[in-house]
Amino acid sequence: MKFFWKIALSFCILIVVAYSLPVVLNPAEKIHQQPGFPNPEASSTDAEKGYPLPVTGYEFYIGQPIEAYTAKHGEPLRKGTAYGGSEWWTFGDTAQDFIQVGVKDGVIRSLFILGDRIDTGMFTIGMNRDNILDEGYLAKDFHLSVGKQEYALEVTDQQQMLTPLLQFENDSFLMLLFDVQTQTVYGMYFLSNEALMDMEYYPVSSDKKYEVKKQEWLRDAASDAENALQIKAALAVMRTHHGVEPLQANEELQAVADQIIPRNEEINDFTAKFALSEQRISNKISELLPDKTVYFLFNEPFYDVPQLFIAMMQDEKIYPFLQDERIKNSAVACNRQYHLIVFGGQPE
């Protein structure tokens, strides 16, 4: 009988050892199975199972009637028209409360935020990449629908560094806007599926492509005037965030900008390729202001300021104009997708 129990005990020990060997010899397999610790070599599909994220912050307003926002935050400072049949409602224009709400047919389709005192929820201005990763995985592939059509987007490596994308359960997205120099979030852009696709920013990886046909939009002077106001406000906010005074309007510079980008006439896209080259703009400024030190930034083909500003902030040429207190004045001229910013000052 004792011999039988010895055999049984030995058999049990062998079973325990056999089942323990994979853990001892290959602990990575066990770690891979534990929730919350994904294997770094896991596929993007595995890593993206946490998407879409729950709605916990300002993404809630996407798809809501504008009254849902005004009921809590009051009436806007101003309302302006925008290309594409929508409107911009500006609720704040300072470094603390800058926010522009994109509205179409009475429904919120976007929120562009630069104000660093706005409590946007889980993700906020000032976060670094580690802070973001503490809250969730930054995916590179997304699936969404506009109307009945399904699309797939693929974020490039460059976009993953400067404008990573987050997706939420209510058919909304958040672009986190990273400062090239500090690698912290300087702004946030909440978007509906349609508003995101209208940007034509992230590459479409699905067979079905998406086209907005912006080239068919007619020139709208009211939208151009609104864009100029937004550019001035955004520059003032970023200057304040960098610890220098906002730029002041200058009539002499404005007259020059208006000659190069006229407010009262249509700019022909074909002739613009020649008349609005950087060299021709530089020559024109030198001709009109021969004794002044003047700098400029010229950008196209963006019809809205958030996308224009996102592109500008990815180019280090903008930073002297945001950081140098010796640059005092500016002027802005806009006509459709053409935007000219003229600066006056004496930077080194």
Image (spheres, helix red, strand yellow):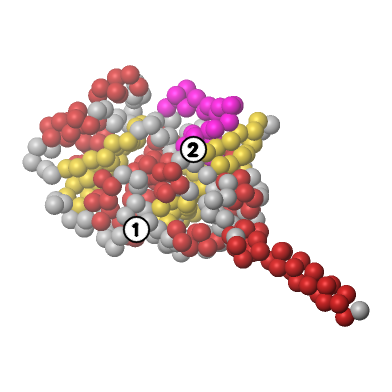
Q: Nearer the viewer, residue 295 or 201?
A: 201
Magenta-span inclusion, residue 203: yes
Disc 1: CA contacts within 10 A as few (<14), some (14-19) or many (>=20): few
Furthest residue in direction right, as rendered: 1
114 w.r.t. 79: above or below: below
Q: Using the image as rendered, state which of residue 292 and residue 77 is in the foreground.
A: 292
Q: Earlier in the sequence, mark 2 or mark 1?
A: 1
Task: Tell me residue 44's x, y (percent).
Answer: 57, 46
Per the image, label 2 sits on a secondary structure element best described as loop
The number of numbered badges drawn on the structure is: 2
Q: Pick out the residue farthest to the left.
A: 291
Report the Cα–Cα distance between label 2 and label 1: 23 Å
Is 77 in front, or is 191? 191
> What residue is rendered at 55% in x and 28% in y?
210
The disc placed on residue 214 is none
Q: Which residues are magenta?
A: 195-219
Q: Say which residue label 1 marks.
A: 182
Q: Is residue 311 left or right of residue 197?
A: left
Residue type, label 2? Tyr
Judge whether 144 appears above or below 279 on screen: below
Per the image, the residue denoted by label 2 is: 202
**Which amino acid type is marked by label 1?**
Thr
Decide: is 340 above or below 216: below
Residue 116 placement: quadrant: bottom left
